[in-house]
Image (spheres, rainbow, N blue to C red):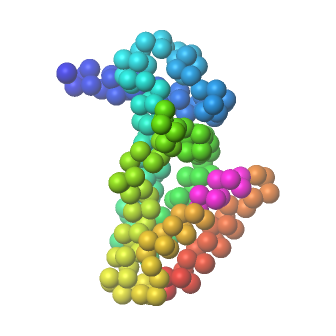
Amino acid sequence: MTKEKTFISEARREQILKATIDVLNDIGYVKLSLAKIAKQAKISTGLISYHFADKEELIQHTLNYLIGAQLEFIEERMKAETDIFEQLLAYITATLTYQNEYVENNVALIEIIFNARTEDNIPYYKLNEEEEDPLYLRLETILSEGQEKRIFSADFDPKSTAILINGAASESMLLQSESFDIKNYQQELIKMVTKIVK
């Protein structure tokens, strides 16, 4: 396959994934169909089938796309920081910013996590249980490195603390409303995390 054909193929796949996200936002996972995704993308269902074997594969790729997009967003905002504590703060800030700015992606992610299952009734997000969540793994690495460099306290468990921080950050996506002050939430979360790690 030529580079041009590969580029066009990748662009088409991304178009389909973004249309899937839009449809998940509009009608939810239960009413999702390839026909509705094709209509949203303004393409034929046959073209979707050319790029994805079936609905299950499409949803699995959409899940991976959503996780990858969030990780890329966070990494982009962390790479300027060399200090491990500043990396931790950048991680928290970027995670909350993403939750606030990419609400559609969050809705699609929630729809998949809570509703998408295989024919064997296995949730899609459990299909790769041997692989750790890259977001949790990234944060756990920061916390462990901070302990190794003796910048962070040794009195906390990196894995448990990563779960705690990501859980608090993820919860913010469910609290979105006019009365929710994301900046204040961010300050309080950073204050709490600082007390744990220092």
Q: Position of residue 115 (x, y in %)?
A: 59, 39
Q: Which residues are magenta?
A: 169-176
Q: Position of residue 176 (x, y in %)?
A: 71, 52
Q: Name the chief secondary structure element in magenta.
A: helix
- Indicate yes or no whether the magenta region holds residue 172: yes
Image quadrant holding the N terminus, namely: top left
Q: Position of residue 11 (x, y in %)?
A: 38, 26
- Indicate yes or no whether the magenta region holds residue 82: no
Q: Quadrant of residue 108?
A: top right
Left or right of 131? Residue 185 is: right
Q: Residue at x 57, y 63 (%)?
A: 167
Q: Residue at x 55, y 33 (%)?
A: 21
Q: Nearer the viewer, residue 188 or 163?
A: 163
**Is the residue 180 above or below the residue 68 in the image?**
below
Q: Which residue is farthest right?
A: 179
**Is the residue 4 above or below the residue 60 in the image?**
above
Left or right of 38? Residue 83 is: left
Label count reads 0
Q: Which residue is farthest front?
A: 120
Q: Position of residue 102 (x, y in %)?
A: 58, 45
Q: Is residue 76 visible?
A: no
Q: Is residue 175 visible?
A: yes
**Is the residue 54 above or below the residue 129 in the image?**
above
Q: Nearer the viewer, residue 8 or 67?
A: 67
**Is the residue 188 above or below the residue 171 in the image?**
below
Q: Residue at x 48, y 37 (%)?
A: 120
